[in-house]
Amino acid sequence: MTIRHPEKINRQSNPIPKKPDWIRVKAPVSSLFKKTNDIVKKNQLITVCEEASCPNISECWQKKHATFMILGDTCTRACAFCNVKTGKPNSIDKLEPFKIAKAVKELGLEHVVITSVDRDDLDDGGAQHFVNVINLLREKSPTTTIEILTPDFLKKPVAKDILEQSLPDVFNHNLETVPRLYTIIRPGSRYFVSLELLYNMKKRQPALFTKSGLMVGLGESKNEIHQVMDDLRSANVDFLTIGQYLQPTKKHAKLERFVEPQEFEDLKTMAYAKGFLMVSSSPLTRSSYHASEDFNEMKKTRESIFFSKQ
C-alpha cells in the first residue's frame, strides 16, 4: 500500500470557503508555545495538534497542553474529514510509552490525552500499546489523570479485553458525524460499531467516564444531531463535544456551512437537557480542547449528583 496524504487521494476538488471572524485564531508566537514544541520534538513525539492541523494549537501549547498521537503518523483508513496521512504504517515504536511519560513529566501535565491513528493492520488494533502507555504514565506521573481517544477497533474483538487491563480516567471515542453521512465521511467505519464500543466500555466499567464528539457543518440536520445525542445517552455516555468541521484541503469533504455560535449554544442546551454530565459546544471545540478543565468539571458534576441522592 502506498503512503499517501489525504489531499493526494482521488477525490472531488472542493473550494475552501473563507472563515468567519469567530473562527479566526492567533498565530503561535509565545515562549511557552516554543517550550512545549521543544519538549515534543526532543522526545520525538507525534501530536494530533500538528497532524490534524488543530486550530487551537497556539492556545493549548501556550498552556503546555498537548494531545499525543501514538502508533505512528500514518493511518490505515482515509476518512474524508481528516488531515492525517493514510497508507501502510511503520512498525510500532516500543520506546514510545517511555517518551510520552518523560514528556508528560517535563510538561507537568495534570491531565493528558492520548490518541492514535487507526491500525487495522494490527491484530488488536493497537489496544496493547494504549495499555503500555497508560501503565507507564501511572508509574511515572501517578497524579496525572489520563484520557484516551481511541479508534473503533473494528473487527478486533480482543481489544476491549486488553483495554480493561489498565483503565484510563476517561474513555473517548468520537462518532464524528451522523449515521447518514458515514459512507461519505467515515467510509471505513460503522456508526453502530462505534456506538457499541462506547456502550460496552460503560457497561463493563460503570465508574469509567465515557466521552464522544461530533463535527457539524457537513450537511447534517438538527434532528439528526439530536438523534445522535439520544443514541449516545442510550449508551450512557457522560460527556459530549461538538465543534465546527474545518476543511483541511480542497480534496477533503466539502464544508457545507459555518454554524453560528448561537447554534452551538442551542445544541449545548439540548445536550444538557438530554442528560449529559458535561457538554463542550463551540466553533473551536475539539475532542481534547480544555480536556483537563472539562474533566474536573465532570467529576464535580457527578459527585454533586451522587451526594444529592444520599
Image (tube, rainbow, N blue to C red):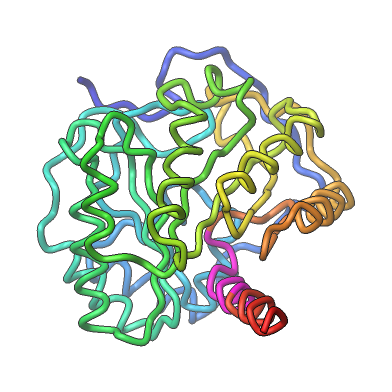
In the figure, 85 relative to 263: above or below?
above
Query: On the image, which quarter does residue 299 sit in?
Result: bottom right
The front one of 268 and 106 is 268
Residue in the image at 19% along x and 41% along y: 124
Residue in the image at 61% along x and 34% along y: 177
Query: On the image, which quarter does residue 260 sit in?
Result: top right
In the figure, 43 relative to 198: above or below?
below
In the figure, 168 relative to 309: above or below?
above
Q: From the viewer's perspective, is 44 left or right of 186?
A: left
Query: On the image, which quarter does residue 25 sit in?
Result: bottom right
Location of the N terminus (image quadrant): top left
Residue in the image at 47% along x and 77% along y: 64
In the figure, 136 relative to 126: above or below?
below
Task: List x then y, in percent, for residue 88.
Answer: 21, 29
Inspect the magenta stretch and tell me whether residue 289 lies in it. Answer: yes
Write the start and end of the magenta stretch as one range: 288-298
Task: List x then y, in percent, for residue 265.
Answer: 84, 55
Q: From the viewer's perspective, is 227 left or right of 68?
A: right
Residue in the image at 48% along x and 36% along y: 82
Q: From the viewer's perspective, is 4 left or right of 250?
A: left
The front one of 122 and 155 is 155
Look at the magenta stretch and give its main secondary structure: helix
Inspect the magenta stretch and tell me whether residue 25 lies in it. Answer: no
Number of residue marks: 0
Location of the C terminus (image quadrant): bottom right
Task: List x then y, in percent, for residue 243.
Answer: 68, 48
